[in-house]
């Protein structure tokens, strides 16, 4: 891997609750270059927590510790809120899971994309509008001038997700975190959205962290996979080699996938081992 964009070493995230400190991420380490890195695991395994930690989007109750948490030339552990505002969107963006909850329902989608650009760049409104329309074309939205004037409830789920991608990429970031961006979409629309994301990552030489629970999807879309269990990375493997995974948790996730070619009366249930929490 060349051109390391992000370095994470021994990252731990705890949340202060009424019952005491709860560990959400434990000792996670990885590097990211110009590649598509998947983080997979069950709900609650810490995937999204890692992504949000990189942007410091956690509440004040979160306690973040790491040996290294470096993005380019910036030490994220030491970065204050002013420094993070300069990073969020402009250098590092996050595509959220469902546009219904991420887009402002009372703003036209074009104005929302323009706002994302104007937060980091100064340009006359007319020129920003041109950039937004060009970005909508990039994400394969037909009649972008018409869609610019639409409100979020007037667009489909697939179009809403492409609008979110446009909004996150228009400031031209170096790294994109996609948090299950296709989980609410049907198979055909999902393929279109992934194709858009793949093209833009290739064109702009981005680093991509793709958070998902879909092993079949990341197998075909990503370069490398981090498998998380209970806040820990239990296995790191090339996406193309997923079938050769060694850790019993990864093997169990793969075995639980339904298959059209291999009919089974009952899908196997993942048997967890307490040793996975420490070994």
Image: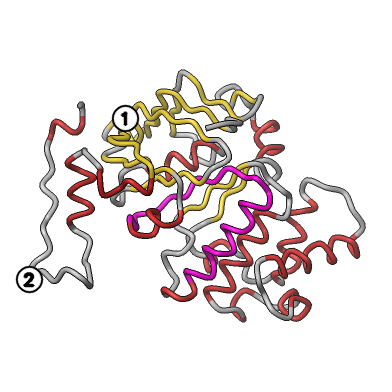
Q: Main secondary structure of the magenta part?
A: helix
For this rendering, which residue is in front, 51 or 198? 198
Can the viewer see residue 110?
Answer: yes
Part of the protein shown in magenta: 190-215
Q: Secondary structure at mark 2?
A: loop
Count the numbered circles shown: 2
Q: Which mark is drawn over residue 21?
A: 1
Query: Vertically, is 11 above or below 125?
Result: above
Q: Which residue is mark 2?
A: 265
Image check: 248 left or right of 238? Answer: left
Q: Is residue 36 magenta?
A: no
Say whether disc 1 or disc 2 marks the residue closer to the N-terminus: 1
Measuring from the top left, give residue 135's x and y in whole percent: 73, 63
Distance CA(mark 1)–CA(mark 2): 42 Å
Q: Which mark is drawn over residue 132?
A: none
Find residue 228 and report its image quarter: top left
Find residue 112 and report its image quarter: bottom right
> In percent of the image, x 52 and y 74: which residue is there?
157
> In percent of the image, x 77 and y 49: which residue is there?
119
Which residue in the rendered view is the most extreme toward the left? 265
For this rendering, which residue is in front, 121 or 174? 174
> In percent of the image, x 61 and y 62: which residue is there?
164
Label 2: how many residues lie within 10 Å, few (<14), some (14-19) or many (20+)? Answer: few
């Amino acid at each position: 891997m060349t051109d390391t964009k992000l370095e994470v070493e021994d990252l731990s995230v705890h949340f202060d609750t009424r019952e005491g400190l709860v560990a959400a991420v434990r000792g996670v380490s990885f590097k990211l270059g110009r590649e598509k890195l998947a983080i997979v695991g069950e709900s609650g395994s810490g995937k999204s927590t890692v992504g949000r930690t990189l942007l410091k989007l956690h509440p004040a109750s979160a306690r973040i510790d790491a040996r290294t948490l470096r993005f380019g030339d910036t030490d994220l552990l030491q970065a204050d809120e002013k420094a993070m505002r300069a990073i969020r969107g402009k250098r590092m963006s996050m595509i959220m899971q469902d546009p219904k909850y991420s887009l402002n329902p009372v703003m036209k989608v074009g104005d929302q994309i323009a706002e994302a650009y104007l937060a980091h760049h100064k340009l006359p409104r007319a020129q920003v509008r041109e950039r937004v329309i060009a970005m909508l074309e990039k994400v394969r939205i037909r009649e972008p001038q018409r869609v610019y004037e639409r409100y979020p409830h007037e667009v489909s789920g697939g179009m809403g997700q492409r609008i979110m991608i446009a909004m996150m990429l228009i400031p031209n970031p170096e790294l994109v975190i996609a948090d299950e961006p296709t989980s609410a979409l049907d198979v055909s629309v999902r393929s279109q959205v992934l194709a858009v994301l793949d093209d833009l990552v290739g064109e702009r030489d981005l680093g991509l962290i793709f958070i998902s629970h879909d092993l079949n999807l990341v197998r075909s879309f990503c370069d490398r996979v981090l498998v998380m269990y209970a806040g820990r990375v239990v296995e790191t493997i090339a996406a193309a080699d997923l079938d050769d995974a060694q850790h019993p948790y990864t093997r169990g996730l793969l075995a639980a996938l339904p298959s059209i070619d291999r009919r089974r009366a009952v899908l196997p249930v993942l048997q967890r081992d307490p040793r996975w929490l420490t070994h």
